[in-house]
Amino acid sequence: MKCNEILELMPDLAAGLSAATPELQNHLQTCKGCEAKLDEFRQTMALLDEWQAPEPSPYFDTRLQARLREEAAKPALGWLHWIRRPALAGAFALMLVLGVSILQRGGDPGSRNKVATVAATPGTAVGDLQALDKNDDLYSNFDVLDDLSVQQDVNANP
């Protein structure tokens, strides 16, 4: 047997709840560490057998009854008392989440939507793209341009 297996059996051996097998006795004779540990367990069990629980104070019952009457006389706490702490904890958690999200976004809620624009000279490719982007609503709803392109195609191909 191994020492770890013996250590698991020692409390029962020391208390006399189980008998020692021949293999266990052989190990205890050869292993002085396990034998010393078993002797310590037996000494501890002997001390526990001698120990006597102290008697309670003669006034214990009187004081206990007085305390129970005091607790029963206290006004009952309403449902608001039980709701208040979780509600405060939830509000604090919500404020914490909002604060962290604002800090992650850079502090200013509108700062993510701002785009730096540089005015390009009209007539260049960048300037034309900026003009198209600026007047996107006007050009998307302007059906006259479509009609003009159709008329030009008809006139070009008679």
Image (spheres, rainbow, N blue to C red):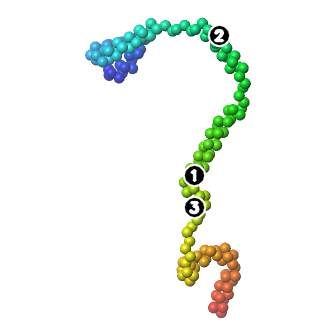
Q: How far apart are marks 2 and 3 (CA)?
A: 71 Å
- Labels 2 & 1 near each other (Cβ < 8 A): no
Mark nearer the viewer, 2 or 3 = 2
Q: Which residue corresponds to mark 2?
A: 62
**Image quadrant assignment for residue 125:** bottom right
Residue 43 point in image, percent of width and height: 38, 11
**Image quadrant assignment for residue 57:** top right
Say which of 68 and 52 sits in front.
Answer: 68
Q: Identify whether 157 is placed above or below 89.
A: below
**Is the residue marked by circle 2 packed among few (<14), some (14-19), or many (20+) residues within 10 Å?**
few
Label 1: which secondary element: helix
For the point 67% across and 85% down, which residue is it?
148
Residue 58 point in image, percent of width and height: 60, 6
Q: Identify whether 152 is placed above or below 18.
A: below
For the residue marked with disc 1, what is the amino acid? Ser
Q: Identify whether 74 is placed above or below 152.
A: above
- Residue 14: mark: none
- Mark 2 or mark 3: name the one nearer the start of the chain: 2
For the point 67% across and 76% down, which residue is it?
138
Residue 79 visible in the picture: yes
**Is the residue marked by circle 1 packed among few (<14), some (14-19), or many (20+) residues within 10 Å?**
few
For the point 63% across and 41% down, which residue is it?
90
- Mark 1 or mark 3: name the one nearer the start of the chain: 1
Quadrant into which the N terminus falls: top left
For the point 35% across and 12% down, which residue is it?
39
Label 2: which secondary element: helix
Q: Which residue corresponds to mark 1?
A: 101
For the residue marked with disc 2, what is the amino acid? Thr
Q: How far apart are marks 2 and 1 (CA)?
A: 59 Å
For the residue marked with disc 3, what is the amino acid? Arg
**Image quadrant assignment for residue 91:** top right
Q: Which residue corresponds to mark 3?
A: 112
